Amino acid sequence: MQRDAGDVSSTKPSLEFFHYKGVKFTKGSIYTEENLRFVESEFQVQDDDVYNVTYPKSGTTWMLQILSLIYSNGDPARTRTVPNWLRSPWYETTSGQKCLKDLTPPRLISSHLPSHIFAKSFFTSKAKVIYTLRNPKDVLVSLYHFAKIMHVFEDPGNFDDFLDVFLRGDLLYGSWFDHVRGWMQMKGSSNVFFITYEELQQDLRGSVVRICDFLGRQLDEAALDSVVENATFKAMKDNKMASFGYVSNEFLDHSKGSFMRKGISGDWKNHFTIAQCDHFHRVYREKMRNLPVKFSWDEDWTEEGAPAL
Ligand code: A3P
């Protein structure tokens, strides 16, 4: 394994945080306790809503692009003229709440919220969630680089320090393990669909077909081709509306890195030492113990007999 952690010193200002029901949020204009309470207890989910839910850096923006294209029958015009955060706002943010008012149903809504603080009204509705997961070691690497350029994240320090932070879950939106375990409790529910970043990479077209089936939407071959063509890494990197190219420097320091960083699976191999990998797997095994689901990245240590995702 090779080190490619890019340990550069950062000039990011320090941030303040608050916790909402055990989950860490950054204090400031984007997250407020009042808005989180509203989202959890009062927000009215509509039966035709579709929620794009992830732990950060698991493929949120990719799924948002896919869903936007499915909703427009493959026509890329809107994905080239309207920034992604207006097409599918993050409803737990104060700015996202304001944008929701301009959405016409059926609404596409994004979220990084863990299930225990997700809108309660979802659980009695017919609305749908698409939950995208990614190999947590790649999530960690992606987040490590993103935290250096995105201002709502604390400076990640060096890679070893950040590994500890990630394993403790002491970061914005809390622990990856809790997030995945929480949402996995919905497995088997007819209105929650699980898919992995790795599946999207291995077979984007087949994944789009599966998502369409779940949403009850029929796309013809030309529309499917267009969804796939406009949701590749390159197409999204070239489209500033799909990749936060127009987010102001106040939030994202474009001079230090790109949101569309590498877009590959397995970059963790370029970052983890063998000792760090061992440490990660030990914590992973403990935290994911008894979860009756097998992921492509944990076949070495998941209990035998668990169903494949
Ligand atoms: P990397 O940092 O590993 O490159 P999120 O949208 O949840 O924040 O996830 C961002 C990650 O998804 C980044 O990963 C980004 O490059 C990757 N990504 C975004 N669009 C992609 C696409 N079309 N194909 C592959 N990866 C994509």
Image: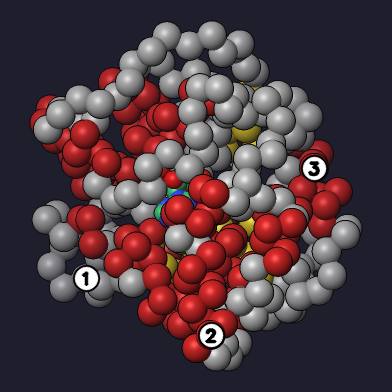
Apparent side of residue 19 relative to residue 193 in the rendered image (left or right): right
> On the image, which quarter does residue 81 sit in?
bottom right
Instruction: Tell me whether the residue at label 1 lies in contact with that at label 3, contact meaning CB atoms closer than 8 angstroms.
Output: no
Does label 1 or label 2 sit earlier along the sequence? 2
Q: Residue at x 32, y 49 (%)?
A: 264
Q: Which label sits in the foreground, 2 or 3? A: 2
Q: Which is more toward the observer, 118 or 309?
A: 309
Q: Position of residue 244 (x, y in %)?
A: 62, 42
Apparent side of residue 237 relative to residue 68 in the rendered image (left or right): left
- Residue 243 in view of the camera: yes
Q: Which is more toward the observer, 211 or 83?
A: 83
As shown in the figure, which amino acid type bears the numbered disc 1? Ala
Does label 2 or label 3 sit earlier along the sequence? 3
Q: Which label sits in the foreground, 1 or 2? A: 2
Q: Position of residue 236 (x, y in %)?
A: 53, 53
Identify the residue under disc 2: 222
> On the image, which quarter does residue 281 sit in?
top left
Tag of residue 306: 1
Q: Residue at x 16, y 60 (%)?
A: 299
- Residue 122 in view of the camera: no
Instruction: Tell me whether the residue at label 1 lies in contact with that at label 2, contact meaning CB atoms closer than 8 angstroms.
Output: no
As shown in the figure, which amino acid type bears the numbered disc 3? Ser
204 over 288 or under it: above or below:
below
Tag of residue 95: 3
157 over 210 or under it: above or below:
above
